[in-house]
Image: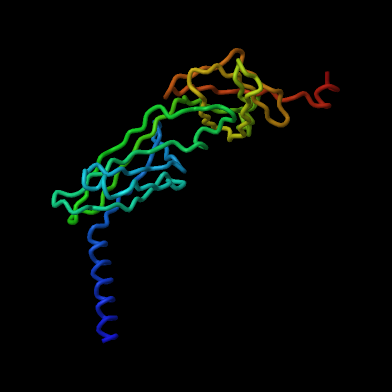
């Protein structure tokens, strides 16, 4: 009797596993920003759109990796027509590296996907816009044109204590809060500090190009020759 009972339990467990696997679906893809760059550490959520699933299934969540990739395991439901899921991204706090500034997400572009037992997988690309613009360009030696490794110091014109320091390559790309007047100072060892003559303000999604030529500092040999 015990052997029969154990066999029945194993059989029931196996059937439940097969049934659950038959209802299991997958939604995967990438999250990109308004420039097409992958967004790491973004939260992606899938909400059930079917009435049946809304009553029985909770929201599925995943975090994107360094390449903006995510994968969600979801339910395909009992409906022969399949299950519908609304998938959308949320911005990670670290996405805009700007201390003490609250930069909120502008728009997130979600998608609705449909999964069935015959087609349980779906791949999507989600777009996440931010209320930021982009400052980009190259920093070089004003005399030789050689590329430099600069450090940017960016501050709110109205709140000078709110500052972000950003070390970059010669070719740089820096996100800035939109519609905020920013002061820009650039330093590099062996060179005179460079400051933008006024303030910079970018619109959401705007790309502003700014190439910077830095003057070498005077050396002892330069002073003696004069």
Q: Is residue 108 left or right of residue 163?
A: left
Question: In this orientation, which residue lies closer to the viewer: 4 or 131?
Answer: 4
The x and y percentages for residue 176 are: 52, 25
The x and y percentages for residue 225 are: 83, 21
Q: Residue furthest right?
A: 224
Q: Is residue 21 left or right of residue 153?
A: left
Question: In this orientation, which residue lies closer to the viewer: 72 or 206?
Answer: 72
Question: In this orientation, which residue lies closer to the viewer: 133 or 90?
Answer: 90
Q: Is residue 114 left or right of residue 212?
A: left
Question: How many numbered tags mark residues here?
Answer: 0
Q: Is residue 70 above or below residue 213?
A: below
Q: Is residue 202 above or below residue 7?
A: above
Tell me the quadrant of the picture where the N terminus can be found. Answer: bottom left
Q: Residue 154 occupies which quadrant of the picture?
A: top right
Tell me the quadrant of the picture where the C terminus can be found. Answer: top right
What colour scheme was applied to this rendering of the protein? rainbow
Q: Is residue 80 above or below residue 170?
A: below
Identify the residue at image location x=43%, y=46%. 63
The x and y percentages for residue 147 are: 60, 32
Q: Residue 224 occupies which quadrant of the picture?
A: top right
Q: Residue furthest left?
A: 80
Identify the residue at image location x=53%, y=29%. 174
The x and y percentages for residue 175 are: 51, 29
Q: Is residue 129 left or right of residue 110?
A: right
Identify the residue at image location x=51%, y=32%. 96
Identify the residue at image location x=73%, y=30%. 190
């Amino acid at each position: 009797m015990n052997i029969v009972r154990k066999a029945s339990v194993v059989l029931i467990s196996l059937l439940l596993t097969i049934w659950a696997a038959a209802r299991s679906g997958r939604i995967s893809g990438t999250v990109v920003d308004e420039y097409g760059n992958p967004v790491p550490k973004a939260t992606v959520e899938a909400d059930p759109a079917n009435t049946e699933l809304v009553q029985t299934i909770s929201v599925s969540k995943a975090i994107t990796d360094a390449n903006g990739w995510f994968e969600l395991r979801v339910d395909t439901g009992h409906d022969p027509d399949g299950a519908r899921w609304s998938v959308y991204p949320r911005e990670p706090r670290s996405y805009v590296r700007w201390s003490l500034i609250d930069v909120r997400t502008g728009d997130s572009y979600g998608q609705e996907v449909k999964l069935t037992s015959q087609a349980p997988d779906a791949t999507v690309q989600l777009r996440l816009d931010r209320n930021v613009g982009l400052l980009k360009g190259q920093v070089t030696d004003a005399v030789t044109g050689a590329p430099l490794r600069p450090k940017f110091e960016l501050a709110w014109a109205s709140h000078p204590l709110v500052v972000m320091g950003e070390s970059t390559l010669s070719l740089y790309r820096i996100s800035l809060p939109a519609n905020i007047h920013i002061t820009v100072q650039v330093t590099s060892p062996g060179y005179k500090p460079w400051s933008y003559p006024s303030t910079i303000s970018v619109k959401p999604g705007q790309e502003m190009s700014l190439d910077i030529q830095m003057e070498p500092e005077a050396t002892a040999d330069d002073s003696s020759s004069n």
